[in-house]
Amino acid sequence: MIRNRVAADVPRCIEALAEVHQAGHYPIFWPEDPAKWLSPSNLLEAWIAERSSAIVGHVVLVAGGDVPDGLPSHGQPLATVKRLFVTPTARRQGVGERLLAHVQAWAVRSELSLVLDVVGPGGDAAISLYERAGWRQTASATVDWTTPEGHPVTVRYFRPPE
């Protein structure tokens, strides 16, 4: 089941995020304040996926976002998909696809143009999910920070099917 995230869900979201981080280093750096990281200041909406009262997935939509100049918004306000994750035990069961479809439907109703970003390295599973859902890479940029190992980080930007 996918539903709107409420404040009381955040501690359980942090627990789910810790599972994801341990399994695959997402996010690359564990946030100093995970609750704040899960709720960016430009938050429009947040959703969770639950199974048997356990949080197995999470996604937020933020207004605007850090996107390369010139990324078209098709005359609509831009919103960015962020903090999308699925716990290791719920992967490959369609949870990520359902969360992404839920965000897309909400954005269409809200007349928003969507983008999402994938921070690499290690984003192969996420990229596969987005491409299966019809999203296509439209831009990339190297950011000014590195992985814990000192490697450069490339952010890839994706747009949904039109």
Image (spheres, rainbow, N blue to C red):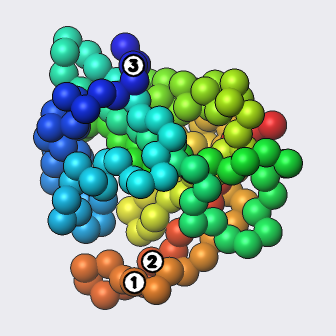
User: Nearest the camera: 78 or 99?
Assistant: 78
- Residue 86 in the image, given as x and y percentages of width and height: 33, 37
Q: Amino acid at mark 1?
A: Trp
Position of 70 compared to 5: left or right? right
Q: Nearer the viewer, residue 58 or 25?
A: 58
Q: Which residue is mark 1?
A: 145
User: Which structural element holds mark 3?
Assistant: strand
The answer to whether residue 16 is visible is no
Q: Amino acid at mark 3?
A: Arg
Q: CA distance from mark 3 to mark 2?
A: 33 Å
Q: Which residue is mark 3?
A: 3
Q: Amino acid at mark 2?
A: Val
**Residue that appears at 22% across and 37% down:** 10
Q: Quadrant of residue 135?
A: top right
Q: Is residue 83 above or below residue 9?
A: below
Q: Quadrant of residue 52?
A: top left
Report x, y in % for residue 31: 23, 63
> Residue at horizontal 30%, vertical 66%?
28
Relative placement, left or right, of 129 versus 49 is right
User: In the image, residue 68 lies at what x, y percent?
Assistant: 68, 71
- Mark 2 or 1, which is nearer the eye? 1
The CA span between labels 2 and 1 is 7 Å
Q: Secondary structure at mark 1?
A: strand
| Residue 8 visible | yes
Pointer 2 with pointer 1, Cβ within 8 A:
yes
Residue placed under numbered mark 2 in the picture: 153
Give the Cα distance between marks 3 and 1: 34 Å
